Each structure stands twice: as structure tokens, then as C-alpha cells.
Image: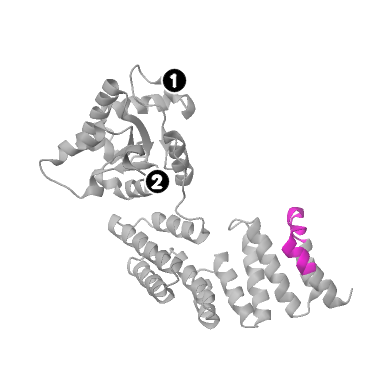
Amino acid sequence: MAEDTLKRIFVSYAEEDQVVATRIDNDLSRTEKVKVWRYQSKGKVGAAFPVEIEENLANSQFVCLLDSPSARRSAWVRKECELARHYFQRTGRAELVPCRVADANRGECNPNCPIPTLLKKVSTILARVPNERNLGEELFEQQNVTTFINFTADYDEAIKRLCEHLEVPYNPRSQVPRDRDFQREAYAAKLTIRQTNELLERYFYFRTWHNGEDWAAAEQEILTLIKLCDFFGARNIVSPRIALGVLQAELQRHDAARATFHELVTKHPSDPRGWAGLAGAQYYLNSYSDAVISYRECLNLLRRGDAERGSHERDMVHNLGWALVALERFEEALAEIENLPERFKMEPSLQKLREHIRFSKGV
């Protein structure tokens, strides 16, 4: 898309909020409808750099202000807010979109620290108006704030709201659940900016090699990522090990996949993804009795509410059914189907399983 057709977005934030700024930058840029500018993405310093900031502010249609205790202490953020207001009043550009990325009311910020006038006004209005949709009606005359988006509760919902406000399509990083799981785990690990970015970059390389079917490079990248997670002490980032086991299964290396998933469920027994992967490897190795145990463990975790259910439960029952059929335990397979919610019972994959059971039983 030609650059002159892109909406220009300026992201104003404190250096301490670089991780979330990078995430928002990446998510907005992926829409391919905007051109995002933020000072650290350019890696520039020097006397001419403040001039470049002013030029990009003047040419931006929106200014996403990442509101946090650090931002409220930042002289740069204060200056950018003042410039944004100036350009909006003169040209109607640089509409300010405050995005809360940390809560100053939780004691994270010294109450005596200087707060830019703009942020102080927004905070006062927020305290008075609990319904964010009415926020614009309360703002003082000629102010360029039309919405307020809270990223501290649900990031995915917030980025969708931001895209909606900017009138650009929301384009998630990946439709693959494992990718989204990794992103959530990486940002929740509370690592340093450098560490978080390094993990995200490694995973991006893994997915690139995987999509290009360069299996050896993909496996090397995911193994490096796993080692990095361990080195950084990020023991709760599980998704790279899931990805390794899935890759091994895709390459028909089911013994290796079984070993990977067995190690995972030993360390993280409450994660249903590990049990599902282990069951799949056991099934392909004709260890049907073990597969039944693992599928049932996965189902128990799903049904206890430790993870999302819905289609995951249906898929596990389908796979469990075929493992039971391989053991000629037909009645158990039918009973598992009957235990599913009504909306799943008539799905084609389960209908096919029922027909196979009837044929095998000679009914």
C-alpha cells in the first residue's frame, strides 16, 4: 500500500513502557493500514531528533498516549502532549488517544510527581465518569481527546478497540492458538525489555522457518528458544515445548514427541495441552491404553475449568473415541460421545465415529 494512503500514528510513551509500546506498534503495523512512528523504533539521538519528533507529530492523524506512572514523570511525554494539543487546535490533526498501560492509582506512582495538565484533566474526568463511552462528552472545550482505552485489564480486547477507533482492521498476529498462547506467556513473564523482545524475535524466526517448511531450521530455533526461556528463568513459558512436540509429531518422529510431551506433563501436570500432545504421540505409536489415560486426563482438566472447553472438549472426545475403538471398547466410546453437550453430538466427525462403531459391532 502506498505510504500516502496510510494513516499516520504517533506513539508517545515513557522508556520504561517500551515493551508494551513495541507490542502496540507491532499490532497496529500488522493491519497494513497505518504507519506508526515512535522514537525508539528509529534508534536515533542527537540535536536533530527533537525536530523529527515535532515533524512526525505534526503529520500524524492520531497520537496514542501510553498513560502510566512513568509517562506522568516524563518531560518528553509532557512535551509531546502539549505539541499534540497545539497541532490539533491548529489543523485538526494529532487527535489524542490516551491508552492506560499502568494504573497510577495502585501506588505505583508518587502522588507528588508532576502530572502533565492533559493527563491530570483526563484522570479527573475518568474518576467522575465511570462509563468510558461518555468520556468524550465530558472533556473540556477544544480538547483533542475522544476516547480512552484501558490496556491493563484485557490487552486483546483493548487493541481491538484501538483499531476500531482508528478505523483500521484488527489483524491478530496469528490465528494459530499456540502462537497466541506464547505471546500471552511471554508478556506475562515480567522479564526485562531486552529478554522479552529476544524471546518474541526467536519465536518469529521459528514460525518463519516452520511456514517455509525448513524443518531443521525451525527445530533449531525452537530448541534455542527453550534454552533461552530456561536461562531467563521463565519456567512458566510452556508454549515453545508444545511447539517442539507438535513439530516432532508433524515430522512423524512420534518417539521424540512422546518424550517431549512426557517431560512437559511431568513439569506442568495441570496443562491440558501437554496431555493432548502426549496422547496423540501414544496413539500413533499404537500405545492405545496409554493414549486413553492421557486423553482422559486432558478431558478432566478441561472439564474442571482449568482451560477453555467447547471445541477442545469435542476434539478430545473424538480422539479418545478412536483410541477406545482400537481397543474394541465400543460401549465406552459411545458413552464418551453421549457425555458431550448436545450441540456437538451430531457433528460429522462424531457421526462417522458412531457409524464405524456400529459397523464394527455388526449392528
Q: Is residue 264 visible?
A: no
Question: Residue 305: x, y in percent?
Answer: 62, 56
Question: Residue 1: x, y in percent?
Answer: 37, 45
Labels 2 and 1: the sequence-earlier one: 2
**Which contiguous range is marked in magenta?**
339-354
Q: Residue furthest front?
A: 2
Q: Nearer the viewer, residue 354 or 139?
A: 354
Which residue sits at x=49%, y=73%? Answer: 247
Mark 2 vs mark 1, CA separation in Å: 31 Å
Dividing the picture into quarters, in which one does residue 50 lie? Answer: top left
- Residue 32, numbered circle: 2
Which residue sits at x=36%, y=72%? Answer: 224
Dividing the picture into quarters, in which one does residue 314 lie? Answer: bottom right
Q: Residue furthest top?
A: 141
Question: Residue 88: x, y in percent?
Answer: 29, 24
Which residue sits at x=34%, y=61%? Answer: 201
Which residue sits at x=44%, y=43%? Answer: 159
User: Which quadrant, please, contains the C terminus?
Assistant: bottom right
Q: Nearer the viewer, residue 343 or 295?
A: 343
Q: Residue furthest left?
A: 47
Magenta-colored stretch includes residue 1:
no
Q: Identify residue for label 1.
A: 137
Q: Is residue 161 above or below residue 183?
A: above
Is most of the magenta stretch helix, strand or loop? helix
* Local SS, label 2: loop
Mark 2, Cα crowd under 10 Å, few <14 / some 14-19 / many 20+, is: some
Q: Nearer the viewer, mark 2 or mark 1?
A: 2
Q: Give, as a three-letter code, the residue at label 1.
A: Glu
